[in-house]
Image (cartoon, rainbow, N blue to C red):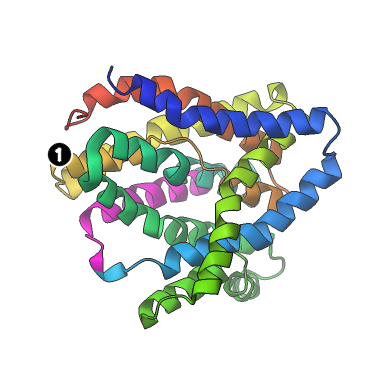
Amino acid sequence: MELAGPVLDVVLPVYALIAVGWAALRAGALDADGVRRCTDFTFTVFVPAQLFLAMARTDFRTLAPGVPAAYFVSALTLFGLVVAVRRRRVPMLRAAVEGLAGAFGNTVMIGIPLVKLGWGDAALAMLLSIVALHSLLLLSTATFVFEVAAASGAPLAGALRALRASLTHPVILPILLGGSWSALGPPLPAVADATLSLLAAASSPLCLVLLGASLGRDGLAAALRPALAMSALKLVALPAVSAVVGRWVFGLAPLELTVVVLTAALPIGANVFLFAERYRSDGAPVAAAVVLSTLLAAPLLAILLPLLPVPPR
């Protein structure tokens, strides 16, 4: 398979960053309290910078609707189904975390280089239309559900408190501000752009290092069963739903369908782990699921690639 080597080239640095975090905790450079503090700091400083910059740099007028529409209809449908089914057996926060794990992928560190290597600039432009809306739609939806689940009291009062908390949340607020800046049109000042770029560049590597440290703290074996279930949702269920929705609902062209299904088959994004830690829910299983889905992604992608409508170049 032509892309077997490039797939490994793309995912091996992800494995390496996770291993660095695991080794740091095992060596005593980090302790459990340090992991939690660093995770909270990353969630409130580096991730908002990444989200604001991504939104501020996006020209939403240039986005073709078909590819992102097919992807997000699939992802949000799966998220909603998981939450609806699982909330009957587990707490709402855990159900929401599992739903986000099934819907939110590593589109930047793995998706962008993989699509560019295999299908070139035309496919990359389609993927970027998904990336531009990825956090806006999935993280914003999940944040509101998390805040509703975390709120206490009457349902209406809880929903109002959740809405208020969501609007000042370190995920939704930078998304709204970045989108507003994009709509207004002016470029970011050079100093602001450079500062935010440095902060944003640290976000994904820090997430993976902290995720590895969390594994060193909690271990993998005890969380293996839920991690397998979440990995199956992301690597099998979402691509299957996306293939059906893209082909039979939106009637996508072959290359468009390839991008949608391939994006759906990417492993779970590390931001899901940050959410779980933030809300003190399922941190260990989600960390294990991110690692496991990343480990399984290479062989599963090698199986999937020949089945996609447009063969790699």
The three-letter code of the residue at mark 1 reads Pro
Residue 109 on image: x %, y %:
47, 42
Query: Magenta span covers which residues?
Result: 62-84
Task: Kindly report the secondary structure that dominates the magenta region of the rendered protein.
Answer: helix
Q: Quadrant of residue 215?
A: top right
The answer to whether residue 117 is seen in the rendering is yes
Q: Is residue 63 magenta?
A: yes
| 210 over 293 or under it: above or below | below
Residue 128 on image: x %, y %:
33, 53
Q: Nearer the viewer, residue 207 or 279?
A: 207
Q: Nearer the viewer, residue 75 or 109?
A: 109
| Residue sitting at x 59%, y 63% | 48
| Residue sitting at x 41%, y 36% | 266
| Residue sitting at x 38%, y 82% | 184
**Circle 1 sits on which residue?**
254
| 38 over 293 or under it: above or below | below
Is 130 situated left or right of 258 in this image?
right
Residue 52 on image: x %, y %:
51, 67
Q: Nearer the viewer, residue 298 or 164?
A: 298
SS of the residue at dot 1?
A: helix
Q: Nearer the viewer, residue 197 or 12?
A: 197
Q: Residues within 10 Å of mark 1 (few under 14, many from 20)?
A: some
